[in-house]
Image: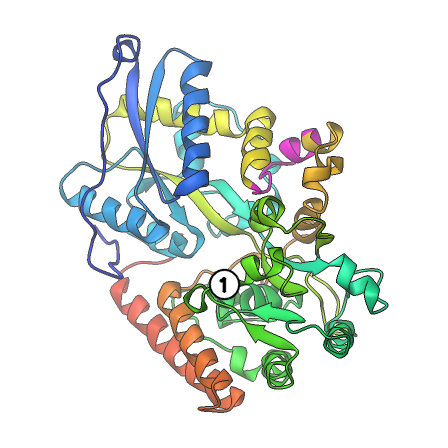
Amino acid sequence: MKFRLTALAAGLALTLGAPDARAQQRQNFTFWYGLTGQLSDVVQEVCKRFNNSQDRYQITCTSQGDYAKALQNTIAAFRAGEQPTVVQVYDIGTADLMLSGQYLPARELMSEQSHEVDWSNYIAPIAAYYANSKGEMLSFPFNSSTAVMYWHRGEGRKVGFENPPATWEELHKALVALKQAGSQCPMSMDFDSWALFEQFTAAHNIPVASKDNGYGGLDAEYVFDSQPLVKQHLNNLLNWYQDGLVKVRTAESGQNVIASFASGDCAVTFGSIASHQTVRLTAKEGLDWTPALLPVYAGHERYNTRVGGASLWALKGRPQAEYKGAAAFFAFLATPESEEFWSTRTGYVPVTRAGYERMKDEGFFERPENVGREVAMQSLLLREPTPLTKGLRLGNLTQFRAAYANEMQAAFAGQKTMDQALASLQEQGNQLLRRFQQTYRSKTLP
């Protein structure tokens, strides 16, 4: 098969327990996923709920560790003819799955198994990320999120900011005021490209790459280094760091951006709405905080942000009977009840309009523990996705993100200017795209 290995394939990790008597009467099928800890526990609850909801199918759900291992283990399993029926693949692995051809497209699967699906029910910017050139979804969105700004309301009010800043210019003023008021960490950031680079370009409708960010073909090239606002933004972040307005917080340094925010050490940070649950459960007592829309630069229109997370793919090469179970599982996940269950326990957003409307009607977003979570839906639904905001269909994105982190670290360490870092990053990125194009030289994006 044509999967591209980004690292050595990890060992096969599927563990099957002995089925009980009831399960032996059912059709078994398997689901591999790349979540751990509390999120893995919730996946297991979801699988149990599906098994208890009917008596025809039995799903066995197994964590493979992280996203990368889930994909690597699936590649290894394919070679042994032991691939799962369903696998969770993170957003940046989408292009690889599409070009592999080793999956059953979502529409085809559901049609063959006689499931009627209102595909327009899926929220547009979420569906677009996992769709082909015709707008047809190839996989099913599962754990979906988008980027937000996390803001300490209490600290903001102390320096005259009643509401979270809506522009980067306003945020700069707030950070200066916070520092003058004695804050040791007005804002924290890390070197992950997702929130402050990838999602920044979406919010401003700026291209990261040609060919509509890769949707138009494998011959796309990175073009962000020719975008003045991208250069201005990243130079601003570096200047703010040099002025003591921004502190770098990473797991390697002992406290990541979310932990530094929840502890009250830093007044502002950026990350996934899925971290809302973590902040809520770990925030110091009395912390007054909220998620907010990503700022935009003054004079620029605001566009929708992109979806992050992962989707579920039905893989080829399994017995036909298993696909009946997979289709039933996908239909179960798309019910408003299932979406509310998943969102309530994880912090991820609903992926269908029906699920979103149910949660609004039931007062989900007004509950104290969920206040602020609707910001993510506002960000995704701000307007219909444009060719530049629907997603990134670019190969070797994992390596590109690593290159981004390295270049940003070099710039923040004073080893090169930000402009030099961006030029180097674009050059490395285009080399990665050409390697990806060569790997799939006989393929075209669906």
Coordinates of residue 440 in the picture (x, y in percent): 28, 62
Q: Using the image, determine if residue 394 lies above or below residue 420.
A: above
Coordinates of residue 130 in the picture (x, y in percent): 47, 48
Residue in front for this viewpoint, 355 or 251: 251
Q: Is residue 151 left or right of residue 25?
A: right
Coordinates of residue 330 in the picture (x, y in percent): 45, 29
Give yes or no for residue 354 being in the magenta stretch: yes
Identified at 32% across, 46% down, the residue is 65
Residue in front for this viewpoint, 74 or 103: 74
- Residue type (three-letter) at the residue carrying disc 1: Gln
Q: Using the image, determine if residue 214 lies above or below residue 377.
A: below
Identified at 25% across, 44% down, the residue is 74
Identified at 25% across, 16% down, the residue is 19
For the question of whether residue 130 can be seen, the reply is no
**Element on which disc 1 rests:** loop
Q: Which residues are magenta?
A: 347-358
Coordinates of residue 353 in the picture (x, y in percent): 65, 36
Residue in front for this viewpoint, 434 or 19: 19
Q: How many marks?
A: 1
* Quadrant in which residue 317 is drawn: top left
For the question of whether residue 75 can be seen, the reply is yes
Q: Is residue 127 left or right of residue 4?
A: right
Q: Which residue is mark 1?
A: 255
Q: Using the image, determine if residue 130 lies above or below residue 312.
A: below
* Quadrant in which residue 260 is drawn: bottom right
Give yes or no for residue 175 being in the magenta stretch: no
Crowding at dot 1, Cα within 10 Å, few <14 / some 14-19 / many 20+, comes out as some
Q: Is residue 36 left or right of residue 288?
A: left
Q: Using the image, determine if residue 407 lies above or below residue 80.
A: below
